Image: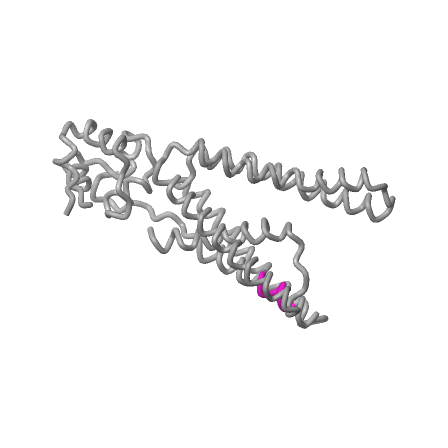
Amino acid sequence: MKNRLKVLRAERDWSQSDLAERLEVSRQSVNAIETGKYDPSLPLAFRIAALFELPIEAIFSND
Amino acid sequence: MTADAPEPATPKIGLAAMAYVATLLGAMAVWQMWRPSGVALAATIAVPVLALGWLIERGIARKRAGSCTTPAQRNYFRRFVPLMIAYVVILLGAVWLKRDFHPGPAVTIFLALLSALPLLGVIWTFARVLVEEKDEYQRSLLVRQIVVATGFMLSVTSVWGFLEDFGQAPHLPLYWAFIIWCGGLGVGAFVNELKS
């Protein structure tokens, strides 16, 4: 699964640690999701979507 | 730190953990098969001790980096360390009591169960960290580490069991399953780092 997390984060000038803190997860989690090594659960995907005020499909895509 | 600034890398520990497991198992095999003495014995002790030193150094580096421990992992270490100290103290005491005082069967059974108790506690700490870990990615790493350790332990004990049955290996007490599983956690840490 691909995602736009890095772009969205860069638009807000947040570091991985900043995003991790906002999502209440570890920085390693943010890094693993950004690099496509880990697909977040639905609850975490919803939290990410809520944080960026976007629908889930605007952040994650299945290709 | 801004979005473009490089993030600090988490110090790797998997290779050191693997090296410790491999050198310790290798040394134990050498002790068992060739019963070395003198310089050869010192060398077989020195190699796993050096690997352990490397593992401890990596562990300290990770702790200093401070980025890879979650509250659940800190709770785990807070439980694990006293349990292992209790294990060593109880085991040494039980061996001493059995050897020097030759207690009856009931007391001997009690001493044996008492020696196993801290290890049951360690297994409980693993269950707790899985329950308490709120970070789903960290939990997935832990689950993979435990699955790899279980596979490692089952593989080693299966192979050893047949070697033993065919008269090619000495008898291995059953409590070694837990020790081999702990070694498997090192292999699991290495696998996690390969995949992340």
- Tell me residue B17's x, y (percent): 49, 55
Residue at image point 56% right, 55% down:
B52
Q: Measured along the vertical axis of the image, is residue B30 above or below residue B132? A: below
Q: Residue furthest left?
A: A58
Q: Residue at x 57, y 57 (%)?
A: B157
Residue B36 is left or right of residue B185, and the answer is right
| Residue B133: quarter of image | top left
Instruction: State the residue in front, B54 or B159.
Output: B159
Residue B37 coordinates in the image, percent (x, y)? 72, 70
Residue in the foreground of this view, choosing between B69 and A33? A33
Q: Main secondary structure of the magenta part?
A: helix
Q: Is residue B99 above or below residue A13?
A: below
Residue under the image location 38 percent in, 53 percent down: B193
Residue A46 is left or right of residue B67, and the answer is left
- Residue drawn at x 58%, y 61% as measured from the top left: B25
- Residue B93 screen position, x and y as percent: 77, 42
* Relative height, residue B21 to residue B130 (above, below): below
Furthest toward the right, the residue is B101
Which span of residues is magenta-colored? B25-30
User: Taking B102 as reference, is B62 left or right?
Assistant: left
Towards the viewer: B70 or A62? A62
Q: Is residue B46 magenta?
A: no
On whether residue B29 falls in the magenta region, the answer is: yes
Can residue B195 be seen here? The reply is yes
Number of dots carrying numbers? 0
Whether residue B43 is visible to the viewer of this picture, yes or no, is no
Applied colour scheme: one colour
Residue B170 placement (x, y as % from top left): 67, 64
Quarter holding the N terminus of chain B is top left
Q: Quadrant of residue B53?
A: bottom right
